[in-house]
Image (tube, helix red, strand yellow):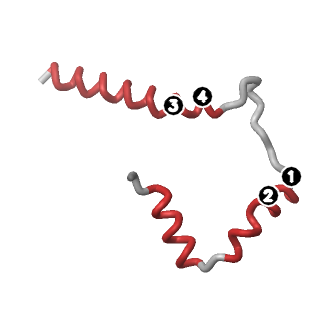
Amino acid sequence: MNRNKLLRRALTAILVVLLAAPLRVLADSNGAAQTFSRQELDQMLAPVALYSDSLLAQILVASTYPG
């Protein structure tokens, strides 16, 4: 029983490290987060408003599907 508990803790630690690693890779090297102005956000997101909600729902689900 003790061995299973140790194995479970080791796997949990490995998963935490693997999940946290991409966050560090995506972070800026100087530690500052990039922020966008309201106009920049509107410009990037405006085309999304042209799609119907049902189509957006399918696209979002498909984008998370492994494969």
Indicate the quadrant containing the N terminus: top left, top right, bottom left or bottom right.
Answer: top left
Whether residues under marks 1 and 2 lie with C-beta atoms below 8 angstroms apart, the answer is: yes
Mark carried by residue 41:
2
User: Seen in the image, is 30 located left or right of residue 18?
Assistant: right
Question: What residue is disc 3 on?
Answer: 20
Q: State the CA–CA distance, disc 2 to disc 3.
A: 27 Å
Question: What residue is disc 1 on?
Answer: 37
Q: Amino acid at mark 1?
A: Ser
Task: Give coordinates of residue 15: x percent, y percent.
Answer: 38, 31
Question: What residue is disc 4 on?
Answer: 24
Quarter of image, res 65:
bottom left
In the displayed structure, would residue 52 be above or below residue 56?
Answer: below
Of the two numbered discs 2 and 3 in the rendering, the one whose residue sits closer to the viewer? 2
Whether residues under marks 1 and 4 lie with C-beta atoms below 8 angstroms apart, the answer is: no
Q: Nearer the viewer, residue 3 or 40?
A: 40
Mark 1 or mark 4: which comes first in sequence? 4
Q: Residues within 10 Å of mark 3 (few under 14, many from 20)?
A: few
In the displayed structure, would residue 13 be above or below residue 55?
Answer: above
Q: Amino acid at mark 4?
A: Arg
Q: Amino acid at mark 3?
A: Ala
User: Seen in the image, is 16 located left or right of residue 47?
Assistant: left
Task: Give coordinates of residue 13: x percent, y percent.
Answer: 37, 25
Task: Give coordinates of residue 18: x percent, y percent.
Answer: 44, 29
Badge 1 marks a residue whose secondary structure is loop
- Residue reaching furthest to the left: 1
Mark 2 or mark 3: which comes first in sequence? 3
Badge 3 marks a residue whose secondary structure is helix
Q: Nearer the viewer, residue 8 or 17?
A: 17
Q: State the CA–CA distance, disc 1 to disc 4.
A: 24 Å
Whether residues under marks 3 and 4 lie with C-beta atoms below 8 angstroms apart, the answer is: yes
Residue at 79% in and 57% down: 41
Q: Nearer the viewer, residue 38 or 3?
A: 38
